[in-house]
Image (tube, rainbow, N blue to C red):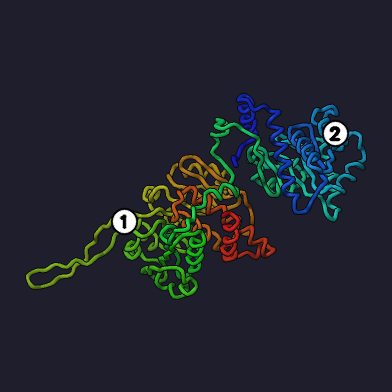
Amino acid sequence: MKLVTVSQMQKIEEEANSKGLSYEQMLENAGAGLAEVVNKIAQDDKWEEALGLVGPGNNGADTLIALTHLAYDGWQVHAYIVKRKKKDELVVRLQEAGGEVTFADSDAEFGALTTMLESAEVLLDGLLGTGIKLPLKTEISSVLEHVMFIMADMEEPPFVVAVDCPSGVQCDTGDAANEALPADLTVTMGAVKRGMLKLPAFELIGDLAMVDIGLPDMLASFYNIKSEVADHDLISGLLPDRPLDSHKGTFGTAFVAAGSINYSGAALLAGMAAYRSGAGLVTLAVPALIHSSIAGQFPEATWILLPHDLGVISSNAVEALTKSIDKATSLLLGPGFGVEDKTKDFIENLLKGGSNLKKKTSTIGFVREDTEEKTETKNELPPMVVDADGLRLLAKIADWHTLLPAPAVLTPHPGEMSALTGLSIDEIQNAREDVALKYAKQWGHVVVLKGAFTVIASPSGESTIIPVATPALARAGSGDVLAGLIVGFRAQGLDAYDAAVTGAYIHAQAGLLAADDLGSTSAVLAGDILDSVVDVMAELE
């Protein structure tokens, strides 16, 4: 789903009109698609009565067209019309289809509106469009306030479907009027409007669906937009194939270099998540000291035991890792590393090819002499994901972004992004997508800027927003699960950007599902998110 500003959507519609798709046909397509969505959600409950709030603009037109389709499908439909002409062609069409029409100017005390609300099972909110200015005008405001007042006292209020956007939401800024009507589902037309993925608007849109309005192929104003919103169909299409004649090698080998004495669970969570993504083999490279405490919890993994210094990976651990690195199809660095300089040296040695002390034997006459000589061995590194403490350690290495095999995937939260860029957290949070895109291009790597509405940015200027904001994901270990998913998809052959988008979407949906299962966002643990990945994957496959 493309992500657009209001003005961009207007230009898209203008170009489509100039290419032969008339505004009228776009409205017809939108209304028909809206009716199809309503019919689909109503199937299980066998709903059959709908009320539409109809304003003067295009969203009102979409609503009238949808109600007309529903009337022909056997629904009992009502339209409550505000500031629209009585002779409007679409109003007449609805009446001819058997729809009931009430004009707000003849319902001074809202008696008719109240009666229709009390019997409706679905409420289509088409009062206002995407280009509104706040505050709302009195006539519109009073209708919305009355609707919310009546619905607040109803035992079973109607299911609210916002047409394109909830009335009262400013679709560029995300601002919302106090009287904006919260939706259970927002059906957006053609593309998602940027303001919907900002607070407070996001709290009002409910679930999000999109209707195709029939835009022509290769429409420049549409095609050239490089920002999109991840959804079920996109991610389902990105998942690697699972052929029947496959073996574990088919799905790659993910190496996870992670953990320290204080953060042993990070390695466990990341490794398990890599397996849950579908990777064929997961190898954990951990400080030898923590192996015995976690190996029994993860029998599916293979292990590389790394030299350690007081429980953290030591600077001379590169050789132990790189002995088997040629088997890896992806490598994750960072979860649970800690921020000791000795582990920074390990990363730097790994990226620069490894500086390892090896014994060289020489002879002088009949006397053997052992000397230590520093030799350089260049390692061919697999595709990489760098997460958590690995990012903070990278920030201490000069020209770090030139040392990573490009494109790597970097998964910073705002604090880690601050360490990498020198920007304040406020500067990052106030321009999340712009910041992610700027540094993805500057560094040449994919950036996954975590947080509410996680942003995935590519060096080529593409960005994808994950349409999820939930405190269920704000928990220690959650990021380890995300990094493990991404490295697992990378191991299976997805490119860096697609692996990041796929992992981030599944991770977010797993957080929502875990919170729903537990009945609380505050009770969700990282392990619950990991467990819920299974159900999310099942829905996608």
Kindly give the residue lying farthest to the top in the view shown: 18
Q: Disc 1, disc 2: CB below 8 Å?
A: no
Disc 2, SS: helix
Q: Is residue 118 left or right of residue 30?
A: right
| Mark 1 to mark 2 CA distance (whole Å) | 74 Å
Rendering coords of residue 538 (x, y %)? 58, 58
Residue 75, quarter of the rendered image = top right
Rendering coords of residue 3 (x, y %)? 60, 40
* Residue for badge 2: 95
State whether residue 57 appears in this view: yes
Q: Is residue 334 left or right of residue 518?
A: left
Q: Is residue 20 left or right of residue 436?
A: right
- Identity, as a three-letter code, of the amino acid under mark 1: Asn
Q: In the figure, 312 relative to 111: above or below? A: below
Who is closer to the viewer here, 94 or 381? Answer: 94
Q: Which disc number belongs to residue 379? A: 1
Who is closer to the viewer here, 402 or 7? Answer: 7
